[in-house]
Amino acid sequence: MQPATVEGVADGAASDKPIDMVFNVSDGGGLTPYQVFSKINNYTGKRLKGYRIVVGVGTGTGFQSASALGIADKLHISLGRGEGWSSGSMGAPNGSDLFDGDGLATFSHGLFGAIDANFPANGFFDTRTAGFDVTQSCAVPPCSTTPNPFVGGPDLINSDTIESTTVLPSNYTTLFGDWLPSTWQPSGVFFDDDNDPNTDAVLQAWWNGSQWVSNNDGGFTPIPAATLEAWGNDPLYAVSHIEDVLNLGINYIVKVGDDLDNDAMTSRSTFTIRIIPVVADSQVAPTFLAAEPAPLVPPVTPPVTPPATVDQGGGCTAVPGNPPIDPMLPLLAALGLAGWGLRRRSRHS
């Protein structure tokens, strides 16, 4: 999401400059679900407090939601609630949820999350998931429903809108506040553990505004000066931005049916996924920007050259450079000229 998407949008308001993604589709013989894995990256230049996604047809001012068009029964968006399957090789639909409750809109698990099958270490900033709760609705209420074809599940909602609601409790809000823009990325020390620049390096410390500190497991304690210097002298360590605090991963399902244009003579049509950023109520800068990150290796202080000594004895002084004229010199010259003049007069008298 770029700055144009929030230009002129008031704090606390949903943008009227959304991102529209148009998909070409062909009739396929019924309602087909497509699971969407994506990220929304905040490059707007403003803090955000969430997002909204709407499915419909058209773009810009010509966009209409599925519920406004009366086609939500054959074009809608789902959070996978009541559409799950039992695990195992003989899995069957059982009316469970496809996604975990805290897995619909989240920041990087490597930064905020507990050890699991895919992540061998706790999240750097927290073992709790960071992100948002999400709800379903319709742009033109009420939403229609469809009987759940899966055993034991509730009726499915033909919603054309999903949106974030409350913030999940985590250290994200404590350390950073509302969803950060790219202009306020925190800095970290990264270790290239496999000496391969094409893979992600491992975050070792982050700059909290006054010092380099450890991760959540380490209590965010200060990194010793000797450790910082050792890192600074090792080419596998580098200071960079922690970009993943900008990137929100969102999971949802879009179900697409036939004849979206309500024209029986055509077999092709289009639909639109509209992404709407919601600006945060406050745009206060984060505290970790209070000072620039300190260098890992202390700067070398050049030696101080002592000032030249000056002889304080009588007579002329000698100092390097271009010293001022000693006041005794003009007087001695004047006396010498006067004596020379007297001698010439005595010789010609």
Image (cartoon, rainbow, N blue to C red):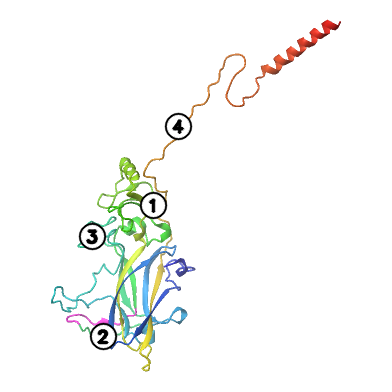
- The answer to if 54 sits in the magenta stretch is no
Report the quarter where the C terminus lies: top right
Q: Amino acid at mark 1?
A: Phe
Q: Of label 1 and label 4, which has the lower sequence position?
A: 1
Q: Secondary structure at mark 4?
A: loop
Label 4 vs label 2: CA separation? 80 Å
- The answer to if 159 sits in the magenta stretch is yes
> What residue is rendered at 43% in x and 70% in y?
13
Q: Of label 4 and label 2, which has the lower sequence position?
A: 2
Callout 1 touching callout 4 (CB < 8 Å): no
Disc 4: which residue: 303
Q: Nearer the viewer, residue 34 or 49?
A: 34
Callout 3 touching callout 4 (CB < 8 Å): no
Label 1 vs label 3: CA separation? 27 Å
**Between marks 4 and 2 in the image, the one whose residue lies nearer the viewer:** 4
Label 3 vs label 2: CA separation? 38 Å
Q: Is residue 338 above or below residue 272?
A: above
Q: Is residue 240 visible?
A: yes
Q: Is residue 207 visible?
A: no
Q: Position of residue 255 (x, y in %)?
A: 30, 81
Instruction: Magenta stretch: give its range.
Output: 150-160
Q: Nearer the viewer, residue 323 or 134?
A: 323
Residue 40 in which image quadrant? bottom left
Q: Position of residue 32 (x, y in %)?
A: 28, 83
Q: Of label 2 and label 1, which has the lower sequence position?
A: 2
> What residue is rendered at 31% in x and 69% in y?
250
Q: Of label 1 and label 3, which has the lower sequence position?
A: 3
Residue 6 in which image quadrant? bottom left
Disc 3: which residue: 119
* Residue count near mark 3 (Cα–Cα under 10 Å), binned few <14, some 14–19, many ≥20: few
